[in-house]
Amino acid sequence: DGFPRTMDQAVALDKSLEVDLVIDLNVPVETIVERISDRWIHPASGRVYNYSYNPPRVHGKDNETGEALVQRDDDKPETVRKRLQAYDTVTAPLIKYYNDKGILKSFSGTKSDVIYVGVNQWLKNQIKN
């Protein structure tokens, strides 16, 4: 997720400012699908639970009210996969564009706290230079 998301946006951005660093976070599709599809909500309050790292005390029930949790259609695995396919189709040319310009740095992984360390250190080094 980020900006620009399309080649038209990238070209327009290049006309208004000089982009000198681009970060690509390369996370496997199944990792993203798992994280998003583990998300369930309590519609009345907006409370969000995630079975991977913030599960409700009772499976399928809101911690405060005991009411049923629901999964948004956008969070269902098949929907997430379709959205990611569309995203990849639109953004793949951007990866090539910025890589060809020599300003793309890609970070791969499945854990946010691991990827963050690499991104943070790389950015600190870039700022020093």
Image (cartoon, rainbow, N blue to C red):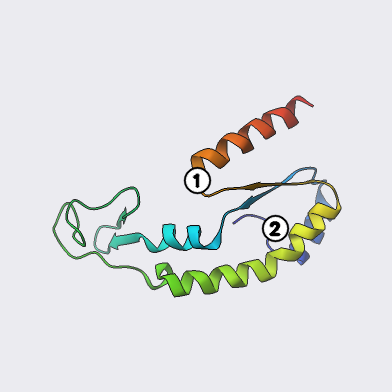
Is 40 drawn above or below residue 101 in the view shown?
below
Measuring from the top left, give residue 1's x and y in whole percent. Answer: 59, 56
Q: Which of the 4 image quadrants contains residue 20?
A: top right
State the residue in front, 11 or 74: 74
> Is residue 1 found left or right of 35 in the rendered image?
right
Residue bearing the label numbered 1: 111
- Image vertical order of residue 110 relative to residue 77, above or below: above
In this image, 13 relative to 56: left or right? Answer: right
Q: Secondary structure at mark 1?
A: loop
Occupied quadrant, residue 70:
bottom left
Q: Say which element carries label 2.
A: loop
Whether residue 76 is visible: yes
Q: Mark 2 or mark 1, which is nearer the start of the sequence?
A: 2
Residue in front for this viewpoint, 107 or 6: 107
Mark nearest the camera among 1 and 2 is 1
Q: Amino acid at mark 1?
A: Lys
Tell me where residue 103 appears, x and y as whole percent: 80, 46
Which residue, as the protein is rendered here, is positioned at the far top? 128
The residue singled out by tag 2 in the image is 4
User: Could you tell me the amino acid type at mark 2?
Assistant: Pro
What residue is drawn where x is 57% and y is 34%? 117
